Image (tube, coloured by chain):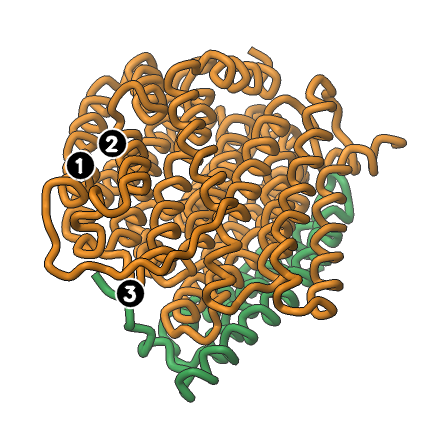
Chain colours: A orange, B green
Amino acid sequence: MQHDALAIVPELMLIATALVLLLIDPMLPPEGRRGLSWLGIFSCITAAISVWLSRDEQFTTFNHGIALDKFAVFFMILLLGVAGLAMLLSEKHLNLRRRLLGDYYALILLATVGMMVMASAIDLATFFVGLELMALSSYLLAGFFRYDEPSVEAALKYFLTGSFASAFLLLGMTLLYGLTGSTNFKEIGDAINGGGVAGGVLVVAIVLLIGGFAFKVAAAPFHSWAPDVYQGAPTPAAAFLTVGPKIAAFAAIIKFFSIILAGEHTTWVPLLIIISLATMLVGATLALLQRNLKRMLAYSSIAHVGYLLLAVIAGGQKTGSFGYSAILFYLAAYAVMNMGAFGVLVYMANSAKGFRDTLDDVTGIGRRYPWAAGIMTVFMLSLAGIPPTAGFLAKFYLFAAVVDSGYAWLAVIGVLFSVVSAYYYLRVIVYMYMRESEAVLEPTGEGSWDLNLGLGLAVAGVILIGILPSQILGAAQDAMVKLLGF
Amino acid sequence: MTPLQHYLALSVALFCIGAWGVLARRNIIVVVMCLELMLNAVNVALVAFSNYSQVIPGRGEVFVFFVLGVAAAEVAVGLSIGIAMYRLRERLKVDELDEMKG
């Protein structure tokens, strides 16, 4: 009992910082708001340190609503890193658009709290509150440029589809509660494995849950909101939205499928196979048609979700396989490379006048912006899965897990799709270095060292994970061992 | 005593009306109302399950309070985004959200 408040110290820190940000923002003159991002970043760092200090703890608290274990610690540190990186990327961009406000950082922090609760929840009610805290903050982040039509349109689309999906998830969770009489993940799992649960209703609940989660991670056929939202949202917010909510949603997917529904894998594995094939197909093919890089990256994130779903299948099919830990590793790699790619777009939008995120705008920037082009090349190679980057090892472990679970044909299809998707990543490099543009974008001369620091950290992350993966891989495996007990 | 199935039938009917409204109606305010209807339909089911549960009575009712709180926050966020949209376009129609395509 005395652990209750101690267990959520990191979350409380972030919430307190968010409230302070909202409180002091109106009192500051516009130029005084530049330091607000650092308040947010420091709160993320201190929260990450306090999570790290409790890494060897393993207990449940809040009436078995929250479990602090290695699994939660892994996700919390990853999510705090993502939030800190997002704030590093944002400051200059918001400043140039005259939308530098503390609300933005407060929303990122609150969304992060929601994600952390999702990663540590083991009760349906706790999980739902975390999910909605994340989702509602994300809708507002997408619409943060509220005088820009695309941004508001993105927010509205995100809100309508996201809330619709939440309602279906909630109905699915209600059915699980009705079937088993408990809201605790472990108790629900035991009741389902113990038998005596109405099979038909359980199938309906599983379908509703998969549908809701597919909406949340933008898996086909529920992906159509994603390109619009990521294109319309402010670029640094899009960097956060393509990564954070997906990480949290996959934490939840792992918990739902490995704790609650592990015994029912014959029902959900075929469904997930169809969804992941459709998702990879949509992600690989429709991205080829895009000239807008934010839209291209949105479809590429859909493709990555397809690969991640393959690993969920692997984890569910073969108990004790490394499918789930491959997801954890993949998410870490995906976080740095995807945020980095968006970060380069932020950099270009800050430093070139009239940059509109299209392929034409990056044509020939290899000569005029050698650093930005060089860094973008690293992220594109990593997203395509070319060694020695993080993306290569992440794909390697993931497909190895899929083969190991007995679905070699799925792994082959996944690799084929990732070869197709390499085309649109490499196309960006070709445009940057091998073509000359007639229209030269005028430089604005606006630099920002926090953005440069953020990009540097992302590059370092991509390369370090690619060369020295053993730490993170070990942490990922440890997390799954502690969660599932094998 | 009314059987559980009656409550569940009511809940599913309300949920379907809400889902139909979200998909078919064009005005954003009406769509937000339908989203609320979906969440409240789930609340009916939660209370009914809780009342008929033999395992731990009352869990579902606690869940309902969380859902109510979340639903209120959702309306606030939805309407504020709606207001931002109305200020830009002076219209609130879902099918006019077509600036981005492809």
Q: Nearer the viewer, mark 1 or mark 2?
A: 1
**Quarter containing the N terminus of chain B:** bottom right
Residue A254 in the figure: left or right of residue B55:
left
Q: Nearer the viewer, mark 3 or mark 1?
A: 3
The answer to which of B90 and A350 lies nearer the viewer is A350
The amino acid marked with disc number 3 is: Gly
**Total marks placed:** 3
Residue A207 visible from this viewpoint: no
Q: Which residue is mark 1?
A: A426
Name the N-terminal-most of marks 3 and 1: 3
Name the N-terminal-most of marks 2 and 3: 3
For residue A284, what is the image quadrant? top left
Rounded to the nearest whole Å, what is the CA distance between mark 1 and mark 2? 8 Å
Image point (10%, 50%), residue name? A436
The amino acid marked with disc number 2 is: Ala
Q: Which residue is mark 2?
A: A384
Circle 3 Cα neighbour tier, 10 Å, few/some/many (<14 / 14–19 / ≥20): some
- Circles 1, 2 touching at the beta carbon (< 8 Å): yes
The answer to which of A426 and A1 lies nearer the viewer is A426
Q: Secondary structure at mark 1?
A: helix
Image point (56%, 14%), residue name? A478
The answer to which of A287 and A294 lies nearer the viewer is A294
Q: Which residue is mark 3?
A: A354
Q: Nearer the viewer, mark 2 or mark 3?
A: 3
